[in-house]
Image: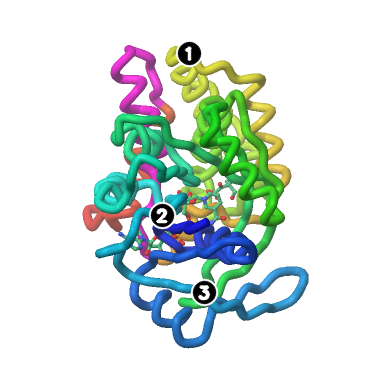
Amino acid sequence: MNILVYGAGAIGSAIGEKLSGQHDVTLVSRKPHADAISSNGLLVCSSKGKERVFLKCVTSIDGMEPPDVIIVTTKAYDSKHAGDDISRIIDDNTIIASIQNGLGNYEHISRRFGRKGVVGTTTMGVTMTRPGEIVLAGEGVTSFGPYDDAAEKITDIFIKSGFEARTSSRIFSDIWMKAIANASINPITVISGKTNGCILYEPYMSLAKEACYEAAAVAEAEGVMLDDPWKAVRDIAEKTSSNKSSMLQDIEKGRKTEINQITGEIVRRAGGIGIPVPINSALLELIRSMEKKDKRL
Ligand SMILES: NC(=O)C1=CN([C@@H]2O[C@H](COP(=O)(O)OP(=O)(O)OC[C@H]3O[C@@H](n4cnc5c(N)ncnc54)[C@H](O)[C@@H]3O)[C@@H](O)[C@H]2O)C=CC1
Ligand SMILES: CC(C)(CO)C(=O)C(=O)O
């Protein structure tokens, strides 16, 4: 199959590399990463050692034939642009799947094409250490949905390429649960400057719990059922207790964060249905001001 991975940074490169064992994979990335991969291949570092893999990596999809599958792995703030760009090269048979954090990716990437797409979420952990080099911290589980032919086809492709993957009948709960975990953990790690485990202790735990319950109320008002969201958040914080959240890493490197697509979406949706979310609203403003390195402070 011809598979295009659009927005190949950390996660996209790791996914593309693994799929390339069985499929004709093209990564779409920015110039430094594309140049490094084209010259020296992709260096994949993991607990198994280091492996250099040669892959096709381009910076533009101009003139491409419609691929069988497009996997979108940009940051969530680039989803709208990704949707616009890939709409130029798809045909009726192209399956489009998003594997990203945050809320609203499905709407940007799939529903806008007027037909079903696939939405995914993953617990893989990958970091890009420099252009052309990634570190795989954990293989994780990747889930796809909604439960239909396209999601099953992508799940099958992933399983046959060696991923732990499943089709989920509750994909929107899974996506919401990941967003709630990110909303409860990530902003607090930025404010505290500590790793994910900080939310298991006071003074951070009460704040994280409030953020979690507020966000869960919004999900439930949207008809999304969640089982014990605070337990799920605590479990994720325990499993990743020594990790620096992606948001803390972004702030430390002076990069844009996904706060608007995580906490911002929760606050926006809460406003639309009249649910008070004071803790998430405060966290949103604090992270936005830290992102801008607010000069008034
Ligand atoms: N890294 C991880 O372990 C995990 C990441 N995620 C989610 O996956 C998504 C991607 O995360 P990462 O891979 O860490 O981010 P990343 O920033 O490493 O990768 C995204 C890449 O997309 C590229 N890109 C964006 N627009 C592009 C365009 N128009 N043309 C070409 N390239 C373009 C960027 O240059 C960047 O290299 C995020 O939503 C993140 O929250 C989810 C689970 C784990
Ligand atoms: C689950 C968690 C919090 C792991 O670090 C994450 O997804 C992130 O950092 O964005």
Amino acid type of the residue that numbered disc 1 sits on in the rendered structure: Gly
Amino acid type of the residue that numbered disc 2 sits on in the rendered structure: Pro
Quote the CA–CA distance across marks 3 and 1.
Answer: 42 Å
**Boundaries of the magenta span:** 254-278
Q: Is mark 2 within 8 Å of ligand 1?
A: no
Query: Can the viewer see residue 252?
Result: yes
Residue 79, magenta (yes or no): no
Query: Can the viewer see residue 251?
Result: no
Q: Residue tagged by mark 2? A: 67
| N-terminal-most mark, 2 or 3 | 3
Q: Nearer the viewer, residue 134 or 41?
A: 41
Q: Residue at x 40, y 75 (%)?
A: 34
Choose top left, top right, bottom left or bottom right for residue 8.
bottom left
On screen, residue 279 above or below 249: above
Q: Nearer the viewer, residue 257 or 158?
A: 158
Choose top left, top right, bottom left or bottom right for residue 110.
top left
Q: Residue tagged by mark 3? A: 55
On screen, residue 218 above or below 167: above
Eye-nearest disc, 2 or 3: 2
Quote the CA–CA distance across marks 2 and 3.
Answer: 16 Å
